[in-house]
Amino acid sequence: MNKTINTDTAPPPYSAYSQAVEVPPGARTVYISGQVGAELDGTVVDDVRRQHELAWQNVFAILEAAGMGKTDIVDVFAIVTDQAGVPMFREVRDQMIGGHLACSTIMIAGLASPDWKIEIAVRAAKIDS
């Protein structure tokens, strides 16, 4: 099982995430490429919140294909296209991963398509039993 690490000798997290996560020896790791808020057919919706939800759903689908789940997420790297997207990212992330405290980094930048408002890349690790 992955171990969260938090210390009071460094600044506390600004929202619901861990300062660090230790992956045990022998864990199988999966690196998920950035997922955007697109439907299965590639359609990008106009609704920004729905894009955030879809990006997470796409991450979860890939995790499931790898035999993993949301509690195996070690690290989240997200890009939103403007500062206003940060609170929404945090809210949807917290809702979608249900209290699981992975590492999390968010960056504000442009994405490959101007229609995309969010992109989420994830690293996950799991000890197979």
Image: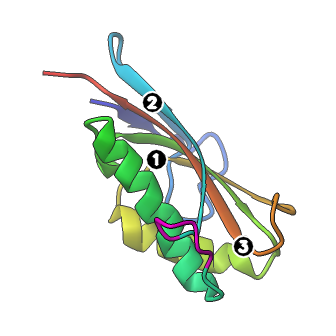
Q: Position of residue 52 (x, y in %)?
A: 56, 73
**What residue lies at 66% left-to-right and 87% top-to-bottom?**
46
Q: Which of marks 1 and 3 is nearer the N terminus?
A: 1
Q: What element carries label 1?
A: loop
> What is the spatial separation of the Cα atoms under label 3 and label 2, in whole angstroms?
24 Å
Q: Name the residue under label 1.
A: 102
Q: Position of residue 18 (x, y in %)?
A: 50, 47
Instruction: Assess disc 1: are there few (<14), some (14-19) or many (≥20) residues with their C-alpha within 10 Å of its C-alpha.
Output: many
28 vs 11, nearest the viewer: 28
103 vs 117, nearest the viewer: 117
Say if 105 sits above or below 3 in the image.
below
- Foreground mark, 1 or 3, reads 3
Kindly identify the amino acid type of the residue bearing the numbered disc 2.
Val
The residue furthest bottom is 47
Question: Which of the labelled discs sits on residue 30, or is there none?
Answer: 2
Q: Mark 3 points at which residue?
A: 117
Q: Magenta residues? A: 39-44
Q: In which quarter of the image is residue 43?
A: bottom right
Report whether 108 appears left or right of 34: right
The residue furthest right is 110
